[in-house]
Every structure is written in C-alpha cells, then in structure tokens.
Image: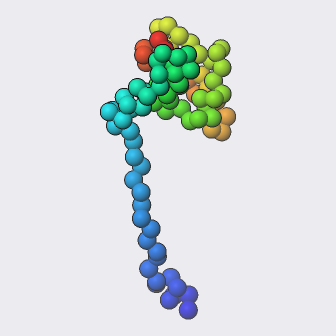
Amino acid sequence: MIHRGLASPSKRTAQTDIAFLTRPEIEALLAAPSQATWSGRRERMVLLIAVQTGLRVSERTGVRCQDVVLGAGAHGHCTGKGRKERCTPWRQEAAAA
C-alpha cells in the first residue's frame, strides 16, 4: 500500500520565473513622480534608493537621518531581517537626491 503511494507521480505546479525590472522599466518608474513638487521629489528619491540598494520595505522604513552618510563613500546603515546590520553603498545619483 505504501509502495503504491510513493510510486505515484507528484503533482507538478507551474513554476513562475522571478522577474526583474529592465533598464527602460526602471527609468519609467523613476520618471513617474512629478519633480515639481516636494512629495514627488521625495517619492523619486525613495524609489531610487530602493532600486539601487535592493533594501526590503521594512529596512527602508527603518532608516533614520543619522543612519545616512553623504559625501564621498555615501552609504546607509539599516537593520535587516533577523536583526542583521547592513551597510549599503549609495551611488552618486542617490546621494545627490
């Protein structure tokens, strides 16, 4: 009886590929917020940092002003999953924003 159960083929489910944004998709996403308003500039900066650093939402929301170092070697400190400390470098465009 057990042998029949183990011999039966397992159900196959469709595997979905993990999709990443292409360069034109990233540029379109960053161009969406209006640069004429303060909130639009803020939203673009948040999106830019998200794209460039790959931080999780919980990590991005936990970043405080004192966790950000600007200038040469710009980077941000954050506490990640499992209370792991992460230091992520920022490109010049993100630091300028």
Looking at the picture, tell me which residue is in the foreground, 29 or 1. Answer: 29
Q: Residue furthest top?
A: 71
The part of the image, by quadrant, that contains residue 68 is top right
- Residue 76, x across and y down, in percent: 56, 20
Residue closest to the eye, 70 or 93: 93
38 or 3: nearer the viewer = 38
Say left or right for 64 vs 51.
right
Taking depth in this image into account, of 32 and 93 the one nearest to the observer is 32
Colour mode of the rendering: rainbow
Q: Quadrant of the N terminus?
A: bottom right
Residue 74 shown left or right of residue 17 in the figure: right
* Residue found 42% across the figure and 49% down from its top: 18
Among all residues in the image, which is located at the extreme bottom? 1
Relative to 91, say whether 19 is above or below. Answer: below
At x 46% / y 74%, what residue is drawn? Answer: 11
Q: Position of residue 84 (x, y in %)?
A: 63, 33
Number of numbered labels in the structure image: 0
Q: Is residue 79 left or right of residue 94?
A: right
In this orientation, does residue 93 appear?
A: yes
Residue 80 x/y as whole percent: 62, 33
What residue is shown at x 59% (from left), y 22% (from top)? 77
Whether residue 75 is visible: no
Name the side, left or right, on which 95 lies relative to 61. Answer: left
